[in-house]
Image (cartoon, helix red, strand yellow):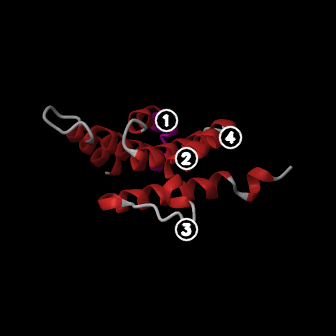
Amino acid sequence: ALDSLAAELAERTSAPGSPDWFAPWGALCRGMADYRTGKHQEAMHTLVAAQKGNAACKGAAWAYSAMASFQLGDVDTARKHLERSRAANEPILVPGQGADLGSSWHDRMFALLALKEAETLINSEDVNRP
């Protein structure tokens, strides 16, 4: 069900007449669904389009790309994508910076939560053992 709902949303966001900024969010939704249903290679492919969105969309897309890379066994790429997610999320990661999150603060928080999930997975104790 998750897969078909995400596919439908992705189609709607790229339909003729949809605002240009919809498409990356639809791709993110599809990529997240692919990741959550174990389709990690498909997620990597789909998330490329999401990486063309605004900073929040990019931050979440890079986090999910990092997690998908990790699940595919490519830890080096996972760490690179994790760094890209951190860069996209930087305005809300620096304590005391006082960044204005604007009216899309919920998107930024969503991206930050995705980053935290990716950090937890990739920096887990099991990965860092000699």
Left or right: residue 127 versus residue 15 is right
Q: Compare marks 3 and 1 and give the one earlier in the sequence.
A: 1
- Asked whether the beta carbons under mark 1 and mark 4 sit within 8 Å of each other, the answer is no
Q: Compare marks 2 and 3 and give the one earlier in the sequence.
A: 2
Instruction: Residue 70: give x, y in percent of width and height.
Output: 62, 43
Q: Of tags 2 and 3, which is closer to the observer?
A: 3
- Residue depicted at 65% across the width and 51% down the height: 122
Label 2 Cα crowd, 10 Å radius (few <14 / some 14-19 / many 20+): some
Q: Of tags 2 and 1, which is closer to the observer?
A: 2
Q: Quadrant of residue 14?
A: top left
Q: Compare marks 1 and 4 and give the one earlier in the sequence.
A: 1
Q: Is residue 37 magenta?
A: yes
The answer to whether residue 77 shows anywhere in this view is yes
Q: Which residues are the magenta region? A: 36-44
Q: Compare marks 4 and 3 and give the one earlier in the sequence.
A: 4
Instruction: Residue 127: give x, y in percent of width and height.
Output: 74, 50
Furthest-bottom residue in view?
96
Label 2 belongs to which residue? 87
Q: Of tags 4 and 3, which is closer to the observer?
A: 3
Q: CA distance from mark 3 to mark 1?
A: 34 Å
Q: Of tags 3 and 1, which is closer to the observer?
A: 3
Give the vertical position of 50 relative to 91 (above or below).
above
- Asked whether the beta carbons under mark 4 and mark 3 sit within 8 Å of each other, the answer is no
Label 4 belongs to which residue? 75
Left or right: residue 87 versus residue 31 is right
